[in-house]
């Protein structure tokens, strides 16, 4: 049963991630403005996603554990280009492309670099959200921020916590309910 729930969680996340940024993109395009969106927040979010994806690939994690990240990254890159376009800063697009491309390769120059970067991912993600909230607070205008996109993002976060719990349950059932193995698996989360 837990394995079926885990598969359902994976499929639902992939479905949500396939469209997670579309409401945001549609709002920006419809308004012809990136008002209320923080460029810094988006860059931090992209950095966190790139680090996570690179880490998963570097350590040969199963594809189903990170398949949604290339999808989200592609949508974030489009959103980044739209923000740059509507803010009149398209010349900076090349700078961001070089920065992320170089970062992708530098992350794996040494093992400690990718490990450190991964340990900082939660902080990067929190900084991204706080930066967006600060932008909203300062402008007193939500502009083109999409509540639907934020709701779908909350769903994917909750799914990851559920996934961790279900993976522990699946590992218990495959180890004949040995409590010592359960403790080891739980501590690895």
Image (spheres, helix red, strand yellow):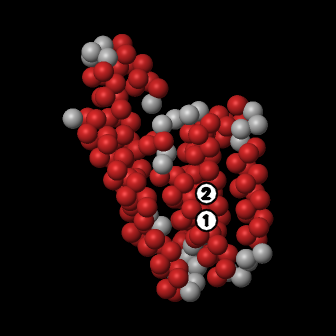
Q: Which residue is mark 2?
A: 46
Is 168 on the left or on the right of 37, as rendered? left
Residue reaching furthest to the left: 1
Quick one: 40 or 77, which is closer to the camera? 77
Q: Are marks 1 and 2 in contact (CB under 8 Å)?
A: yes
Q: Which residue is mark 1?
A: 77
Graded by Cα atoms within 10 Å as few (under 14), some (14 to 19) or many (20 or more), the crowding at tag 2 reads many
* Image spot of residue 149 (x, y percent): 43, 66
- Secondary structure under badge 2? helix
Q: How many marks?
A: 2
The quadrant where residue 2 appears: top left
Quick one: 152 or 13, which is closer to the camera? 13
Which residue is located at x 29 percent, y 46 percent?
8
Label at residue 60: none
* Image spot of residue 45 (x, y percent): 58, 57
38 up-or-down from 112: above or below: below
The quadrant where residue 105 appears: top right
Task: Identify the image quadrant of the N terminus.
Answer: top left
* Image spot of residue 134 (x, y percent): 57, 66
Is 43 on the left or on the right of 158, as rendered? right
Task: Identify the image quadrant of the C terminus.
Answer: top left
């Amino acid at each position: 049963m837990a394995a079926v729930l885990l598969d359902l969680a994976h499929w639902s996340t992939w479905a949500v991630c396939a469209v997670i940024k579309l409401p945001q993109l549609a709002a920006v395009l419809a308004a012809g403005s990136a008002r209320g969106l923080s460029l810094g927040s988006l860059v931090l979010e992209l950095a966190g996603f790139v680090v996570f994806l690179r880490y998963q690939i570097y350590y040969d994690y199963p594809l189903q554990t990170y398949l949604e990240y290339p999808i989200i990254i592609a949508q974030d890159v489009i959103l980044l280009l739209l923000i740059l376009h509507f803010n009149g800063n398209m010349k900076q697009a090349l700078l961001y492309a070089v920065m992320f491309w170089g970062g992708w390769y530098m992350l794996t120059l040494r093992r400690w670099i990718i490990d450190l970067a991964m340990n900082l991912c939660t902080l990067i993600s929190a900084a991204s959200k706080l930066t967006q909230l600060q932008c909203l607070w300062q402008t007193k205008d939500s502009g083109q921020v999409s509540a639907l996109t934020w709701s779908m993002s909350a769903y994917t976060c909750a799914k990851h916590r559920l996934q961790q719990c279900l993976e522990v349950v699946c590992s218990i059932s495959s180890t004949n309910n040995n409590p010592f193995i359960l403790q080891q698996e739980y501590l690895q989360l």
